[in-house]
Image: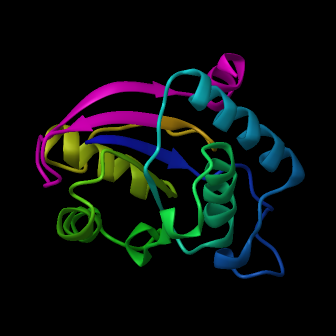
Amino acid sequence: MNLYIVRHAIAEEPGAKSDSQRPLTEKGREKMRKVARGLHAHGVRLSLILTSPYTRARETAEILADEFRLTGEKMIQSVHLAPDSSPARLVEEIRAHYSRTENLALVGHEPFLSELVSVWLTGTPDLQVNFRKGGVCALTLETPQAGRRATLEWLLTPSQLALLG
């Protein structure tokens, strides 16, 4: 399984809207379109996108879905990608429902995504991984279970990905 861990793009600052309702800024949308084109140019293929239900993550996932021409049923919201979830719950969801997906994108938030990558690489949530907004990490995974199961292929910033596109 190829996993593409994607941090949501630049969103509006906290303010009148609840955290879960903050949308992407225009700059965030534009940069994410460049990131998506860069992923495509880099040879990334996506079969399915799981996204946090938060607005900024959903909008990021929609940009990816547009670039990779994935239809509505190929983008699924998962409460286990929300910022307050646990990596163990998401790993179990993937194992139970998506283990046969060849190219899976996970769109979510920090610090959750860093903890998830750390759990797959080291077996603990302690490894420090720096995800910039719109950044992407590629892992390969033989079996979607927690604990030293993944290989880090690459971790790219949005600027690096934009240059590829």
Q: Position of residue 80 (x, y in %)?
A: 37, 72
Tell me which residue sits at (41%, 58%) in the image. 112
Tell me which residue sits at (67%, 43%) in the image. 67
Judge whether 65 appears above or below 31 on screen. Answer: below
Residue 47 lies in the magenta stretch: no
Q: Position of residue 31 (x, y in %)?
A: 77, 38
Image quadrant where residue 137 sits: top left
Tell me which residue sits at (79%, 81%) in the image. 17
Residue 51 appears in the figure: no
Judge whether 133 appears above or below 165 on screen. Answer: below
Residue 155 appears in the figure: yes
Q: Position of residue 74 (x, y in %)?
A: 49, 62
- Picture quarter with the N terminus: top left
* Front residue of this view, candidates 99 and 55: 99
Span shown in magenta:
137-165
- Picture quarter with the C terminus: top right
Left or right for 143, reference 156? left
Q: Position of residue 76 (x, y in %)?
A: 48, 70
